[in-house]
Structures are given as structure tokens and as C-alpha cells.
Amino acid sequence: MYEFFSEYGLFFAKTLTLAIIFVGSILLLIVAAAQGKRKSGEGEFEIEHLNEKLSETTKAVKEAVFDKDAFEQELKAEKKAEKARKKEAKNKKDEPESEEARKRVFVLDFDGDIRASDVDSLRETISAVLTIARPEIDEVVLKLESGGGMVHSYGFAASQLKRITNKNIDLTVCVDAVAASGGYMMACTANKILAAPFSIIGSIGVVAQIPNFNKLLKKHDIDYEVLTAGEYKRTMTVFGENTEEGRKKFVQDLEETHVLFKDFIHEQRPDLDLSKVANGDVWYGKQALELGLIDGLKTSDEYLLESCDDADVYEVSYEVKAGLVDRLGEMVSLSISKTADRFLTRARKTEIER
């Protein structure tokens, strides 16, 4: 009798788990469909004054390190200096046609995947910054991390950055880890590229990888036909049989894309010797500096801290807030995960006890 109930309990647990996963999958599909209908412009801008953040951090460190009297004296000195600075700024503001306005630095962030998905947030942020940034005075700093991806996606992202330099606003790109292939395509639009010593730079090349299952289909007597109108409508296929002619055309397309890539790099950095760097290879920051791929070795943190000395530095981001659909999706996903783990744990426990 005990074995019967144990087996029944195990069977029931597995069945219920499968049912929950099935229902949850349907709900997730509904959530995904609803997310696909989301309109653009539903996000919010988040702006942080890095000077104030740095000031608060410095104050906290001093309070922890200095004794009470020294800390109070330091606070008084800082308040006096801040009062003098505000008075000076007010006097300059009151001066007619004053051209000595304090510089502003706008910090953007781009974390690129293969589809350059972050470009939607980037374009919104750039549009906002361009409404207030002053040509030949202000600066935009982009913290860029990307190993590259789709040509058209990264080409569009690079075009967004060109909007900044086209307005005569200095653009500095900081690379702390990697800016390769499409990532470097974006970086080279800047007036100045800074990179950490061991960041990965370069990969000015084009690659395409296509699996082919034609032999597997033939082994199981499965026919697959590709019907096209136009000689080069489909040169390579995943399931059909690829021809030597199709391969040659595909490689030709890759070579032409590579030429376009090199031409773009040359337009942005005309002094770069493409014969040395446009072979698809990558280099560490120090090597990239020697080759002319970048303009200096410096982390983004170091550069922004230095900028705070003589400019107001603002970190600007555009975030899409999670709506009801997003929260529902997260709840369903978390619930499915926890339920599945709980029942599978009970099932394993029952088997061990047996």
C-alpha cells in the first residue's frame, strides 16, 4: 500500500508539474504577444548629476576617516568654496552675452548585443541631449561595450552617434572591456576614443556562419525545396543543398560588406593604416594605441572623475518602465520556476525514500 501511494504521489507530482509548465508557457506566449504591441516612447529619462554624487561620496569617506573637528572644518571650507563658486557663476550669468558658461558633459551608455538592441534607448537619449547641448562647448561621453553583431543594426547605431558630431558637439567614446567589429564601427565616429589597457579593440572584418541540415534530411528521405524568383534571391540555405555558385556569391557579398566597413572606418579615421588593422584581428588597448585605433589609455571612471573638475557631468539614460504586462510575465515566469523546482524536489525525495 505504501509503495502504491508513493508511486501515485510521484506520478501526480510529475503530471501537475507538466500541466503548470504548459499553462505557464501559454501565458508567456500571450505576454510576449502583448509586449510586441508596445509602442515606442513609453520610457522615462533618468538623469544623475555625477558631481553631486562624487561630492556625497567624498563627504562620506571624509566623515569616516577624519576626526570630528577636522571633518567639521572641512565642511566649513567646502561650504565657503561652494558659496564663492555660486556667486561667481551668478555674476557671469548676469554679464551680457557671456561666453564663459560652464561646460556640461552628458554621459550615455551602450551595452551592445548581437542585434544592437540598446540602439532604441540610445536614439531617444541622443535626441534629448541634442535639444540642450551647446556646439563647441559641451561634450557627450559614450561608455561603449560591444563585441559587434548585425551589420545593419550597428550601422544604424553608428549613424545615431554621427548626429552628435554633425552638430559640432565633441563625442568621446570610452571602452572599458570591448569594442570590436560593429562596436568599433560605433567607436570610430568619435572625436576621441579612450580605452582601458587590456580592453579588446578592432576586428574590422565580416563573418557569417550558416548551419546546413541537408545531409540529415536526405538520410531520413526528407525532401526540402527552395523556390526563388531571381538568380541571387537565396544563395545559401539552412535545409536545402548549397551549390558552389551560391557559396561564391555569398563570399562576394561578404567581401563587399567588408569594403563598405573599411571605407566607413577610413572616413572617420583617415590616418589609420587599414592594411594593418582591417584583417579581422583584435588588439589589446596598448597595442590599439600604437596602431592608431584609439587615442588614449584611460578608463571611463578616470575620465569622468577628471571631467568633474571643470564641468557639470550628467549621466543620462532612457529606461522603459515595466508595465502590467511585463510584471505579469515576470510573476508567471517566477511562479513556474518555483513550482517546478518544488515538485521536482519532492519527486526526487520520494524516489530516494523508496
Image: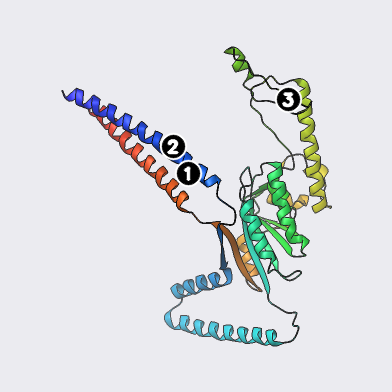
Asked if the residue under mark 3 is in contact with the one under mark 1, i.e. CB atoms within 8 Å, the reply is: no
Q: Amino acid at mark 3?
A: Thr
Closer to the camera in the image, 38 or 308 = 38
Lateral position of residue 113 relative to residue 75, left or right: right
Residue 256, by quadrant, is: top right
Q: Is residue 111 above or below residue 214?
A: below
| Sooner in the amino-acid sequence: mark 1 or mark 2 | 2
Query: Which quadrant of the view contains residue 190?
Result: bottom right
Which residue in the protein does label 2 denote? 26
Q: What is the three-letter code of the residue carrying label 2?
A: Ile
How far separated are the C-alphas under marks 1 and 3? 35 Å
Q: Which residue is mark 1?
A: 31
Which of the two residues, 308 or 285, is positioned nearer the viewer here?
A: 308
Quadrant of the image occupied by residue 191:
bottom right
Q: Give how far apart the Cα atoms at labels 1 and 2 are.
A: 9 Å
Q: Residue at x 61, y 55 (%)?
A: 121
Q: Mark 3 near mark 2, Cβ–Cβ under 8 Å?
A: no
